[in-house]
Amino acid sequence: MKTEKNILIAFILNLSFAIFEFFGGIFTGSVAIVSDAIHDVGDATSIGISYFLEKKSKKKPDEKYTYGYLRYSVMGSVITTLILLVGSVIVTINAINKILNPTEINYKGMIIFAVFGLVINLIAAFVTHGGGSLNQKAVNLHMLEDVLGWVVVLVGAIIMNFTDIKIIDPLMSIGVSVFIFINAFKNLKEVFDLFLEKIPHGINIEEIKKHILKIDGLEDVHHIHIWSMDGNYNFATMHIVTNEDGHKIKEKVREELSEHGISHATLELESVGEHCHENDCNAHLNVISGHSHHHH
């Protein structure tokens, strides 16, 4: 619940501030402030989307979404990221235009504005920090970016006030955009890894296999598949070969898996010498794990 409430507060703060900021940018003639406003409108929209999707992602699994709704939270992250990528490109184009045709800037107004922006964003960052989902991380990242952005604008405004070097303003704007672009891109890669069912970050199949094989009475383990719903909840399926009491073995395997950060496991039991039905699949997995199975 905390995550949702945080996201909602962040949304309201961001949107109202972005609108205010947009006019402030026009009033002071600073493209850096206008670019920050565009970035903030992007943030606010994406935070709004995140809010609804985060809410939805809390729903329990049902017959349509048997894995639950966690991936909705991830979708929030995708939409946010795309908005930011597009936003940073637009801002860069504006800034280049401004370098070519410089205009008057009200430095004093810009300084006052930047101080104001810094304070508001610090409060917002403080309110929204914490929370584990990729979505919440994305929202938090925005908050920190906003704080950084304003620090840059403030320093730039003070320098321009004393030196009247107008080009500093669009350069700051481009700096902010590049920073946003790189971060958004990294975020996108994380999300693609999830959708491609890549092994979750920080989990090593060989390592897990080694630990599971140490369990007494467990002869072999194969068909290990591990994936993550949202970067936090990891799932695994595997076949275990044993002649012992299945219950005890399963308990031990589950304990071992949860120590490795896997919260949900589906385990298939086979007795030693039993024919495993998924031979084709076995052949591929042997290549990966580098040894052949001794129960065909």
Image (cartoon, helix red, strand yellow):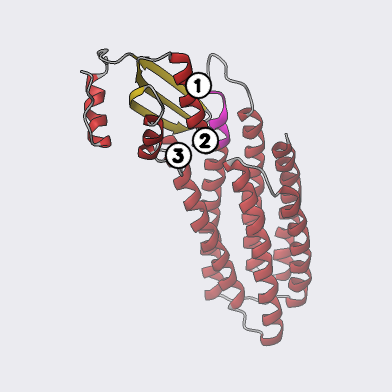
Percent position (x, y) of residue 239?
A: 36, 21
Nearest the camera: 279 or 190? 279
Q: Earlier in the sequence, mark 3 or mark 1?
A: 3
Vertical arrangement, residue 218 with respect to residue 32, above or below: above
Look at the image and tell me in which quarter the C terminus lies. top left
**x, y (%) of residue 151?**
68, 69
**Magenta span:** 67-73
Task: Name the residue that disc number 2 marks.
Answer: 259
Using a 10 Å C-alpha cutoff, classify the residue at mark 1 as few (fewer than 14 neighbours), some (14 to 19) or many (20 or more).
Answer: few
In the displayed structure, 20 sits above or below 25; it is: above
Q: Which mark is residue 251?
A: 1
Residues at circles 1 and 2 in contact by the CB criterion of under 8 Å: no
Tell me the SS state at disc 1.
helix
Instruction: Tell me the amino acid under the disc marked 1.
Output: Glu
Is 172 magenta? The answer is no
Q: Nearer the viewer, mark 3 or mark 1?
A: 1
Spatial distance from mark 3 to mark 2, Cα to Cα?
15 Å
**Pointer 3 with pointer 1, Cβ within 8 A:** no
Give the SS element for disc 3: loop
Residue 111 to residue 254: above or below: below
| Quarter of image, res 225 | top left
Instruction: Give residue 76's position: percent from left, percent from top.
Output: 57, 38
Q: Mark 3: which amino acid?
A: Pro
Spot occupied by residue 200 in the image (x, y as percentages of width and height):
45, 39
